[in-house]
Amino acid sequence: MSGHSKWSTIKRKKGVADQKRGALFTKLGRAITVAAKQGGGDLSGNFQLRLAVDNAKAVNMPKDNIERAIKRGTGELGGGELHELTYEAFGPDGVGVIIKALSDNNNRTASEIKHTLNKHGASLGAPGSVMWQFNEKGVLRVDREQIEGQSLSYDEIILKAIDAGADDVENSDEGLTIYATRDTFEKVKTVLEDASLQCASADFELIPENTVDLTDKDQEKLDKLLEALEELDDVNEVYHNAE
């Protein structure tokens, strides 16, 4: 997903209307549940869980919701078993689309995603048909307001991130986007937190190796497809390789 579109997604989540906030919390809660199931409910010993909880706190998810999601993952509360699912698809002008979902009913999720793709002129691809165009990276985003409220300059923050092991840093109108590997991600995040910088988002994402430049018409089609996919209850993240 391009940096600009991801920043737009973050802003949309923060400004989500009240009637949609419950659906957003459900998605975030599922991510917390899966992380707790895989690595336990101790935040200090489960980095993936800490990431999921931090992302939930960033959009003001209530503490009780977070605690219940953790307990579902550790088995203290009941609930259907969640499965991590990945779908690969082709959108307008052959744009590659990766859809990440968490579901307690694989058939339902597959049906809803296929229906949405077909409705918007997109098609489901075979496993591996799109994924080869993407690389997983740790991505941390700090918005401009956060940085301007601190004593550190942009250059000082960038140097701290690079010294901690960041691979690359992009400076845009929205703020800083910092890239790291799985081995350095936690250290980079800690350095930012020690500098009193709260990340707008911090997680592992699929970044395209190359991007496709779309016409305005195809871009509009893609935007509608992405919005429809993101509104599905089981879909957690959608990535694409459009510019």
Image (cartoon, rainbow, N blue to C red):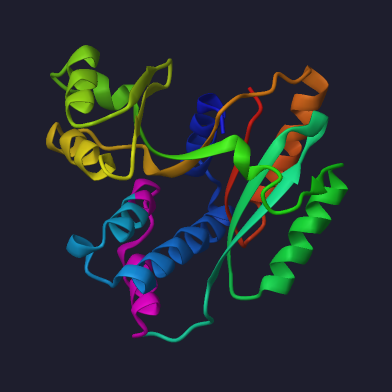
In this view of the protein, which residue sits in the foreground, 147 or 136?
136
Q: Say if the magenta span includes residue 60.
A: yes
Give the image quarter of residue 211. top right
Q: Quadrant of the C terminus?
A: top right
Which contiguous range is marked in magenta? Answer: 55-76
Q: Is 57 situated left or right of 7 in this image?
A: left
Judged left or right of residue 94, residue 82 is left
Q: Position of residue 221 (x, y in %)?
A: 79, 32
Q: Dividing the image into 4 quarters, which one contains the N terminus? A: top right
| Principal secondary structure, stretch drawn in magenta | helix
Residue 16 pos. (x, y %): 53, 45
Compared to residue 210, the image places residue 233 above or below, namely below
Tell which of 182 and 66 is nearer to you.
182
Residue 26 relative to residue 76: left or right: right
The picture places residue 26, in percent across and down from the top left corner, at: 51, 63
State left or right for residue 128 relative to residue 20: right
